[in-house]
Amino acid sequence: MELDSNAVHEHLEAEAKALGFHAFGVAPVPLELRRDYYEKWIAQGKHGTMEWMERNNERRLHPEHILPEARSILVLAMNYYQPDPDRGYRIAKYSLGDDYHNLMLRRLKKLCRVLREEYGAAQKPYVDTGPLLEKPIAEAAGLGWQGKSTILVEPKRGTWSFLGNIVTTLDLPVGTPGKDRCGSCTRCIDVCPTAAITAPYQLDASRCISYLTIEHDGPIPLEFRKAIGDRLYGCDECLDVCPWNKWAVPTSERNFAPRTLPTLREMLAWDEATFTERMRGSPMRRLKLNRFRRNICIVLGNAGSREDIPALQIVAAGEDPVVAEHAEWAIEQLKSD
């Protein structure tokens, strides 16, 4: 019996909504994914030290190479918006609560079970973990468009969404690609503290505060330290100013609720065991203790007080040369105020 693809689409969308995804779309396979733009971006070194972005590009740019007989990519979005807690330092909203990767992957696997058991499809799920260009795929599926910041913008929703994908052999009706509705707005470009958005739709990740405080290992260049300000982990400036976020509503997903964290001075004194325990299940655990301390030093240098100097002096005398140098820099900033 031949499947009614429209009915299957409606069924899967209903299942996705029941799993907590607010948006569901389908992109076709094969799919044209701006190969020239991506390869030029990599060749220019705009990806910084994220060497993994140089690998698996045939699969990244040709999703049909991921799964034999693939016909569709299901694209799902989950809201994570919530106001910033008032605690003297900022953490990117996506990382305020539990790590989204595991939560979303578990739910995608439930949808995969439906695909397999009810429709006999083969599939592979991804949550920011495989060789997929999620945002162009989401645009192709009709969820929204890639804005001038390169972030996906959803109409009447904004920018605060996690994306998940399921590459499947099921042939489904595809969405109408999202239409760019940024117009003449340049708020995201104008607000970027490090001028990482070098032109509309052009991001130099090596200048981005999210890259510098999360992905970058080693010393943070001096030219960016003051611009980091009070941002401990990540940066939401280009998202915060997007006018499409006027429709944003706080997430109802309790796993994304902000964790309770102590002062920067207290966290600077954490040892490896304390860091591991307190950051269990958090996206920030990926930093490991040395980069976490490095970031704390920068924020204290920018937004701390002379009362923080003794704590900084302790790590300045420690064994990690990168942390020690950042602590010394912070002490100099505080003494010069």
Image: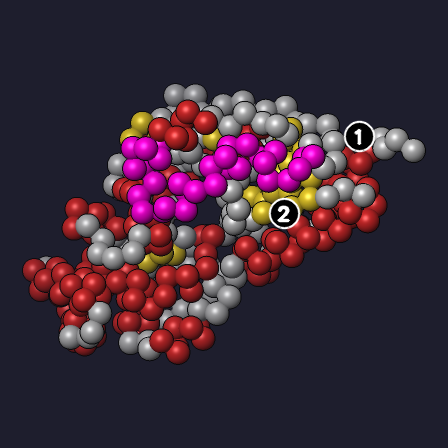
Q: Quadrant of residue 291?
A: bottom left
- Within 10 Å of the Cα at label 1, are there few (<14), some (14-19), or many (20+) other Cα atoms? few
The quadrant of the rendering that contains the N terminus is top right
Asked if residue 290 is positioned above or below residue 36 in the image, the reply reads below
Asked if residue 120 is positioned above or below residue 186 in the image, the reply reads below
Answer left or right for 291 relative to 182. left
The quadrant of the rendering that contains the C terminus is bottom left
Q: Quadrant of residue 46?
A: top left
List x then y, in percent, for residue 86: 38, 60
The amino acid beneath tag 1 is Asn
Residue 61: say if magenta.
Answer: yes
- Residue at mark 2 to residue at mark 1: CA–CA distance: 22 Å
The amino acid beneath tag 2 is Pro
List x then y, in percent, for residue 308: 20, 71
Asked if residue 111 is positioned above or below residue 136 in the image, the reply reads below
Label placed on residue 130: none
Answer left or right for 89 relative to 36. left
Answer left or right for 293 relative to 56. left
What residue is rendered at 52% in x and 61% in y?
Answer: 98
Q: Magenta region: which residues?
A: 41-70
What residue is rendered at 42% in x and 73% in y?
Answer: 276
Identify the residue under disc 1: 6
Q: Quadrant of residue 217?
A: bottom left
What residue is rendered at 66% in x and 50% in y?
Answer: 108
Q: Nearer the viewer, mark 2 or mark 1?
A: 2
Say whether residue 327 is visible. no
Identify the residue under disc 2: 125
List x then y, in percent, for residue 90: 35, 56
Q: Secondary structure at mark 1?
A: helix
Of callouts 2 and 1, the N-terminal one: 1
* Depth check, front residue: 125 or 310: 125
